[in-house]
Image (spheres, rainbow, N blue to C red):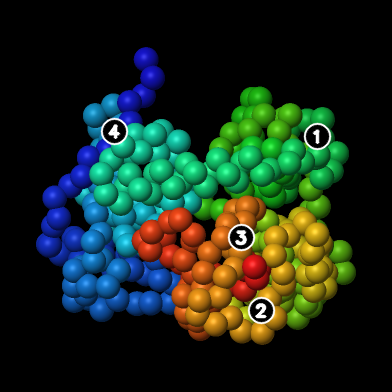
Amino acid sequence: MSDEISVKRLEPVTDELALRRGRVVAEALLPGVTMDKQADPSLGTFHGAELWRVEKNGQPLFDVWIGALPRGVVFEPGTEQAVGQLFDGQAGDFEGICRAAVEAEGLLGRWARRAFALAEAAEASIVEQPPPDEMLDALPAAGTFVHVKWKKRWWPAQVQSVAEDSCRVHYDGWEANWDEYVPLDRMCRAPQRVDGVAVGDAVSVDYRGAWYAATVLAVQPDGRLRIHYDGWDASWDEDVVPSRVKLGAPDAPDAGALPGTPLSGDLEAGASVYIEYDGAWYGGTVLARNGQLYRIHYDDWDSSWDEDVPTARLRGR
């Protein structure tokens, strides 16, 4: 018998747990913002927010707080322990949850319908990738860096443990919710070190399909590099596996493969743009400048899905 996933909306609550969850939500949705301990959930980020419980076979699986921004922060049931952001598919049975939520009223149903539409559009645009290196002829040892095939693409990962016929892997740059067991035929070799790199070197780092300029802060004993993304604050610093790093500045993208035109200068409110999301491009409009980012609105989507994006994800149209 297959597992049954169900969702139900919870009544709004105003106790201390709700306040603590509210601060977690705000800080997850708005990096760099620290909420006061007495933050009122009826203000700002929490205006119109909805709290839902996801159950599996009648047992609480987790709670989801869907905010006015296009994210749902996931909590352990009845706690303030955040375990992921549902919009990014970081919580358990993503497809099952989406299917159960599509017909729900309010923000959760709207989120699920949009998540499916974006996923379908992104998957339709993906071209099958060949292995970036030789296929493995035996299961690699724990700690080995590999590439793992997932939905037509090969992703940098590190082996966490080895079972009889598979390896548990962690996808580099993604949360532990994505860890999984994969068989040998989904893995190929990957570089174990970046030759000739030193602290202070300028490098390019692959972050979920796009290359960003960065600086090396440290070389770790296992071969990973501690890097700082140029133009971003230190909260974005991370350790990356060698296959995500290239020496030097990012290559200019092939203009013929991208929609619209490169940006020239600052964008004004009202500018028409293309916005990159998970490898696909969508039409939209600039609403305002927000520090180093631009606040944008996606065409044909309501304002609950507006978000702040860097210029690397924008093209003129």
* Mark 3 Cα shell of 10 Å, populated few (<14), some (14-19), many (≥20): some
Which of labels 3 and 4 is toward the front?
3
Which of labels 1 and 3 is toward the front?
3
Picture coordinates of residue 81, whole percent (x, y) = 32, 55
* Farthest-out residue, top: 1
Q: Nearer the viewer, residue 87 or 316?
A: 316
Q: Nearer the viewer, residue 114 or 2?
A: 114
* Mark 4 Cα shell of 10 Å, populated few (<14), some (14-19), many (≥20): many
Check residue 230 in the rendering and tell me which mark sits there, or answer none.
2
Quadrant of the rendered structure where residue 188 is? top right
Q: CA distance from mark 2 to mark 4?
A: 43 Å
- Residue type beneath disc 3: Glu
Picture coordinates of residue 13, whole percent (x, y) = 13, 57
Q: CA distance from mark 1 to mark 4?
A: 40 Å
Which of labels 3 and 2 is toward the front?
3
Check residue 276 in the rendering and tell me which mark sits there, or answer none.
3
Mark 3 and mark 2 in contact? Answer it, CB < 8 Å.
no
First in sequence: mark 3 or mark 2? 2
